[in-house]
Image (cartoon, rainbow, N blue to C red):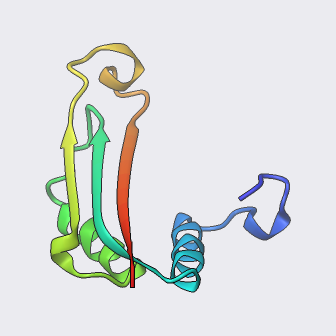
Amino acid sequence: FPDTDPRWKGCDSEAFLEEAWRIMDEKGYKVSNLDVTLVLQKPRISPIKDKMKDNLVRILKTDDERVNIKARTHEKVDSIGEGRALSCHAVILVDLK
Protein backbone atom coordinates (compact mmCIF):
# COMPACT_ATOMS: atom_id res chain seq x y z
CA PHE A 1 0.00 0.00 0.00
CA PRO A 2 2.39 2.71 -1.16
CA ASP A 3 1.65 6.15 0.27
CA THR A 4 2.19 7.55 -3.22
CA ASP A 5 -0.79 5.60 -4.66
CA PRO A 6 -3.80 7.95 -4.74
CA ARG A 7 -6.13 4.95 -4.61
CA TRP A 8 -5.35 4.55 -0.90
CA LYS A 9 -5.39 8.25 0.09
CA GLY A 10 -7.92 8.84 2.85
CA CYS A 11 -9.09 5.22 2.88
CA ASP A 12 -10.72 3.74 5.93
CA SER A 13 -8.37 1.20 7.51
CA GLU A 14 -10.97 -1.47 6.80
CA ALA A 15 -10.20 -1.11 3.06
CA PHE A 16 -6.58 -2.14 3.64
CA LEU A 17 -7.57 -5.26 5.55
CA GLU A 18 -10.21 -6.14 2.95
CA GLU A 19 -7.61 -5.88 0.19
CA ALA A 20 -5.12 -7.99 2.15
CA TRP A 21 -7.84 -10.61 2.68
CA ARG A 22 -8.73 -10.53 -1.04
CA ILE A 23 -5.12 -11.22 -2.01
CA MET A 24 -4.81 -13.96 0.60
CA ASP A 25 -8.06 -15.59 -0.59
CA GLU A 26 -7.03 -15.30 -4.23
CA LYS A 27 -3.83 -17.20 -3.43
CA GLY A 28 -5.79 -19.98 -1.72
CA TYR A 29 -5.30 -19.16 1.95
CA LYS A 30 -7.66 -18.82 4.90
CA VAL A 31 -7.25 -17.48 8.42
CA SER A 32 -6.20 -20.11 10.90
CA ASN A 33 -5.69 -17.75 13.83
CA LEU A 34 -5.38 -14.01 14.47
CA ASP A 35 -3.93 -12.68 17.71
CA VAL A 36 -4.03 -8.93 18.34
CA THR A 37 -2.38 -7.17 21.27
CA LEU A 38 -3.09 -3.48 21.83
CA VAL A 39 -0.58 -1.66 24.00
CA LEU A 40 -2.09 1.55 25.32
CA GLN A 41 -2.61 3.39 28.55
CA LYS A 42 -6.10 4.56 27.62
CA PRO A 43 -8.86 4.22 26.59
CA ARG A 44 -9.89 0.93 28.07
CA ILE A 45 -10.94 -1.35 25.25
CA SER A 46 -13.25 -3.64 27.22
CA PRO A 47 -16.39 -1.68 26.23
CA ILE A 48 -15.57 -2.02 22.49
CA LYS A 49 -13.58 -5.26 22.39
CA ASP A 50 -16.51 -7.38 21.17
CA LYS A 51 -17.30 -4.93 18.38
CA MET A 52 -13.63 -4.87 17.32
CA LYS A 53 -13.59 -8.66 17.22
CA ASP A 54 -16.86 -8.81 15.27
CA ASN A 55 -15.41 -6.43 12.68
CA LEU A 56 -12.26 -8.51 12.26
CA VAL A 57 -14.27 -11.73 11.96
CA ARG A 58 -16.51 -10.11 9.32
CA ILE A 59 -13.71 -8.59 7.25
CA LEU A 60 -11.54 -11.70 7.38
CA LYS A 61 -14.52 -14.01 6.75
CA THR A 62 -13.49 -16.33 9.55
CA ASP A 63 -14.92 -17.85 12.71
CA ASP A 64 -15.18 -16.07 16.04
CA GLU A 65 -12.94 -18.56 17.83
CA ARG A 66 -10.08 -17.85 15.41
CA VAL A 67 -9.71 -14.21 16.53
CA ASN A 68 -8.28 -13.05 19.85
CA ILE A 69 -7.90 -9.46 21.02
CA LYS A 70 -6.20 -8.42 24.22
CA ALA A 71 -4.79 -5.24 25.65
CA ARG A 72 -2.12 -4.21 28.09
CA THR A 73 -0.75 -0.97 29.41
CA HIS A 74 2.80 0.31 29.22
CA GLU A 75 2.93 1.07 32.93
CA LYS A 76 3.07 4.83 32.35
CA VAL A 77 6.47 4.53 30.63
CA ASP A 78 7.37 6.48 27.44
CA SER A 79 4.89 7.97 24.97
CA ILE A 80 2.60 4.95 25.13
CA GLY A 81 2.47 4.98 28.92
CA GLU A 82 1.91 8.73 28.92
CA GLY A 83 -1.12 8.24 26.66
CA ARG A 84 0.41 10.10 23.68
CA ALA A 85 0.71 7.00 21.49
CA LEU A 86 -0.37 3.39 21.22
CA SER A 87 0.97 0.26 19.66
CA CYS A 88 -0.74 -2.70 18.04
CA HIS A 89 0.79 -6.09 17.39
CA ALA A 90 -1.09 -8.45 15.10
CA VAL A 91 0.05 -11.96 14.29
CA ILE A 92 -1.90 -13.99 11.79
CA LEU A 93 -1.45 -17.65 10.96
CA VAL A 94 -2.84 -18.73 7.60
CA ASP A 95 -3.48 -22.17 6.15
CA LEU A 96 -4.17 -23.39 2.67
CA LYS A 97 -7.88 -23.84 2.04
Residue at 37% x, 59% y is: 92
* Quarter occupied by residue 65: bottom left
The answer to whether 73 appears left or right of 83 in the picture is: left
Q: Residue furthest front?
A: 96
Give coordinates of residue 67: x percent, y percent: 24, 67
> Front-most of 77 and 5?
5
From this viewpoint, is residue 48 visible? Answer: no
Residue at 26% x, 76% y is: 54
User: Vertical placement of 49 versus 78: above or below?
Assistant: below
How many callouts does the rendering have? 0
Give coordinates of residue 30: x percent, y percent: 39, 79
Q: Residue furthest top?
A: 77
> Front-most of 92 and 95?
95
The answer to whether 79 appears left or right of 24 in the picture is: left
The answer to whether 31 appears left or right of 12 in the picture is: left
* Quarter occupied by residue 61: bottom left
* Quarter occupied by residue 96: bottom left
> Front-most of 63 and 16?
63
User: Vertical placement of 79 versus 30: above or below?
Assistant: above
From this viewpoint, is residue 85 visible? Answer: yes
User: Vertical placement of 20 versus 30: above or below?
Assistant: above
> Front-most of 94 and 5?
94
Question: Which quadrant of the figure contains the C terminus?
Answer: bottom left
Give coordinates of residue 81: x percent, y percent: 30, 22
